[in-house]
Image (cartoon, grey):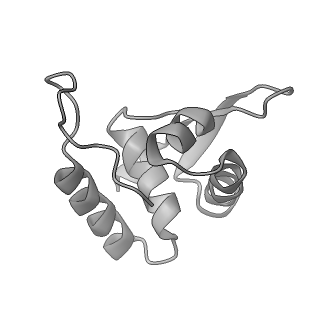
Amino acid sequence: MSAPLQNHGKKDNAPDAAHFLHLVERTLASNPELSPVQGAILVAARQDIARDSKTFARLFGMAHAIVLRELNSLIQATGLVTQTKRDTRTLRTHYQPTSLSDA
């Protein structure tokens, strides 16, 4: 997974890559059943960096199909995020963290 969240001339409120990766590591430590991609999806949703699959895929330089697979598994197996909308043509899936993700 590439680290797109570097502060190279971006908006002042652009997230810091090191901080983001630290949050992913903490999430994975408290949820060992998650894959690294699932941890990143969850943190990105919590931090309001990406709340749809296409945006996440673009920001992290990943294939949309891989993000969809990980997101669907995250939604079905953990209940930490919930699907809020899905485009039937593009499969772009919008999601948000649940109250379980705050625990």
- Name the residue at 37% across, 34% down: 49
The one nearer the camera, 20 or 85, is 20
Residue 74, placed above or below residue 46: below
Locate residue 94: give its quadrant: top right
The N terminus is located in which quarter? bottom left
Residue 77 drawn at (x, y percent) = 66, 64
In this rendering, does residue 100 appear at all?
no
Residue lying furthest left: 12
In the rendered structure, the answer to whether residue 4 lies left or right of residue 66 reads left
Residue lying furthest front: 8
Locate residue 40: give its quadrant: bottom left
- Name the residue at 33% across, 61% down: 24
In this rendering, does residue 58 appear at all?
yes
The one nearer the camera, 16 or 10, is 10
The C terminus is located in which quarter? bottom left
In the rendered structure, the answer to whether residue 40 lies left or right of residue 38 reads left
In the rendered structure, the answer to whether residue 42 lies left or right of residue 82 reads left
Residue lying furthest right: 89
Residue 20, placed above or below residue 95: below
- Name the residue at 78% across, 34% down: 91
Residue 89 drawn at (x, y percent) = 86, 26
- Name the residue at 61% across, 41% down: 82
